Amino acid sequence: MSVDEVIEIFNDVMTFLKYVKKYDRLNDLDLGMISPRDVDDELIEYLEENDIFENMDYESTTDDLKNILLLAQIKKDQDKTFKYIVDTLLTDVEIRDGGYYLRLRGREELSEFFCGGNRNRYSARQVAEQILSEEGLDYVYYDSNTKPYETVTELDDTNLAKLKDIIYKEVGNVELSLEDYDSDYFEGLSEEQGTEGYFRITPESLNTLLKDTDATNELFSNDLDEIGSELKNLYWNSENNAYENEIYDLVMGGLNQYFDGPILEEPKKIGENTRYIPYVKIRDFIGDVLSFIQSNRGSSYADSVLEYYGDYSSMMISLFNEDIQECIDFRIPEYPDWSRTTKNINEMFNDYI
């Protein structure tokens, strides 16, 4: 006689279970033989109240009862149950150093924790994948209209003094033809010096010259064009370095939502070669798993059990897709941060000028 036939005699599962309990034989039942159509909240609550799940075997349990079984076993022995989970169900997680660590196929795998979409040129996920890759960010902020004056105005007192010394060394007290310059500044300087058709740059005039936008740009486009080119390169690289570092900080800071500490590289010898396996500590592995099994409690769908995914990352993606957990997101900046750019200009000045 099948279980269904036996249950039919009692009209329903609950009546049958209460009868079995009367004779203290509940723990002898193979609940895996109960049809998923008979599993409801009343049945689950009854089984939980009678501690039936604590001694059940996970692998032989039906999908609709597996998460309920895990919850009961976690309640009884959390450490033992989570060891079973990482050994059998989510095999990319290891217990080490008092925590749960995600073993990565590559750093780029962590980009799966970021949100997709396309608000700007790239989504947070696309940018994260680039930042976490060996190649790095392939998009740079490019300002083709940068002029030397923009660099000069960001120099601190020390670097501005160095630039003045370099200018004076190159063209100080040299006769510079007015035919090469259109700025009113140089016309006025020539009149002030009483010269005709030319002017000279003196230590005194440098102070006012470098405060004049047109005069500064003209000087670095003519007699000091090589220095002017380096000033533009300095600004460009300072901007792009600031932009990339800001996005790097957004990505790595975002990872703190689900991970704790840096990405570790563990060497593994494979023949004569050494491969480095990346690991990262999961901030709240227990909480994440509980979030999954609680949200899928009593579900009989194939994707409602941990072994369907087999790894932590895939499980988390399912939680993101169901809006149970929030993916990591940030707004991609449109422009480099001004304070970072200025800092870079002054730190990198000696490398260019």
Image (spheres, helix red, strand yellow):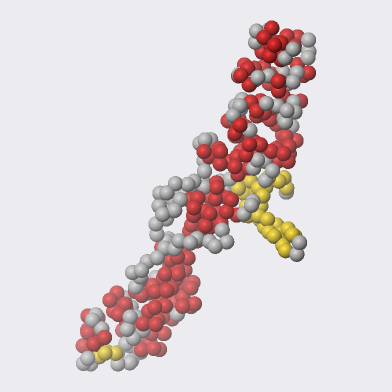
Residue 86 vertical position relative to residue 252 in the rendered view, above or below: above
Is 306 displayed left or right of 187 in the figure?
Answer: right
> In the depicted view, which residue is nearer to us: 213 or 313?
313
Q: Residue furthest front?
A: 1
Is residue 102 among the parts visible in the rendering? yes
Place residue 65 in its image quadrant.
top right
Give the position of the C terminus as an image quadrant.
bottom left
* Residue at 57% in and 54% down: 108
Is 167 displayed left or right of 245 in the figure?
Answer: left
Give the position of the N terminus as an image quadrant.
top right
Q: How many marks?
A: 0
> In the depicted view, which residue is nearer to us: 350 or 254?
254
Residue 138 vertical position relative to residue 118 in the rendered view, above or below: below
Is residue 285 among the parts visible in the rendering? no
Place residue 57 in its image quadrant.
top right
* Residue at 46% in and 75% down: 349
Residue 260 vertical position relative to residue 81 in the rendered view, above or below: below
Please provide percent x and percent y for residue 285.
64, 41
Place residue 37 in its image quadrant.
top right
Please provide percent x and percent y for residue 261.
62, 52
Residue 108 vertical position relative to residue 89 in the rendered view, above or below: below
> In the depicted view, which residue is nearer to us: 145 or 191?
145
* Residue at 72% in and 30% down: 58
Please provide percent x and percent y for residue 115.
49, 46
Please provide percent x and percent y for residue 170.
39, 88
* Residue at 71% in and 46% down: 94
